[in-house]
Image (cartoon, helix red, strand yellow):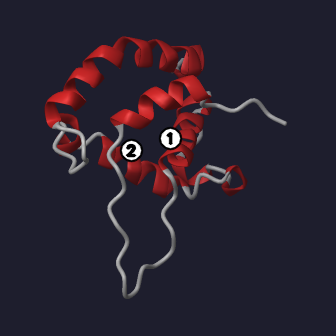
Amino acid sequence: MAKPILDEELWSIIELLLPSPKPRRFGYPGRKPVGNRQALTGILFVLKTGISWNQLPREMGCGSGMTCLRRLHQWSSPVAASGNMGTTASTSAFRITARGQAGLVASHFGQLLGASNTRR
């Protein structure tokens, strides 16, 4: 079995920083959304390998490349960056957690992406 891109230690930190998914509609809920961990795995795979978003293999279970790209845009929006995401945690608690874990997350992402993300 292949080594997972996102290990448990890093996921436990990042999971607290991501917004909770909005509730599904009752009448016509549509298809189930891709989980945050699967979307982040797809995002990391695209960034690490350098493939285009539409070439993300569906066999990975990350949804489509557009799903991962949309999730990346949602997470990096100004509302998400300010901490006003509608989660149960207060904005100040989110900011404290984000500041405290930023260095650790950045170092993990640096190790995950390595030099393969640099353009030549």
As measured in the structure, the alpha-carbon distance from the residue carrying label 1 to the one carrying label 2 is: 8 Å
Residue found at x 85% / y 36%? 1
Q: Nearer the viewer, residue 46 or 76?
A: 76
Q: Quadrant of residue 5?
A: top right
Left-right relation of 35 to 80: right
Amino acid type of disc 1?
A: Leu
Residue found at x 57% / y 33%? 50
Which residue matches tag 1? 40
Considering the numbered disc 1 on the image, is that residue within a helix, a strand or a loop? Answer: helix
Asked if 59 appears above or below 50 in the picture, the reply is below
Q: Quadrant of residue 44?
A: top right
Residue found at x 35% / y 77%? 25
Asked if 97 appears above or below 88 in the picture, the reply is above
Residue 81 got which mark? none
Which residue matches tag 2? 72
Left-right relation of 11 to 22: right
Considering the numbered disc 2 on the image, is that residue within a helix, a strand or a loop? Answer: helix
Badge 2 crowding class, 10 Å Cα cut-off, few under 14, some 14 to 19, many 20 or more, is some
- Frontmost of labels 1 and 2 is 1
Residue found at x 37% / y 88%? 27
Amino acid type of disc 2?
A: Leu
Badge 1 crowding class, 10 Å Cα cut-off, few under 14, some 14 to 19, many 20 or more, is many
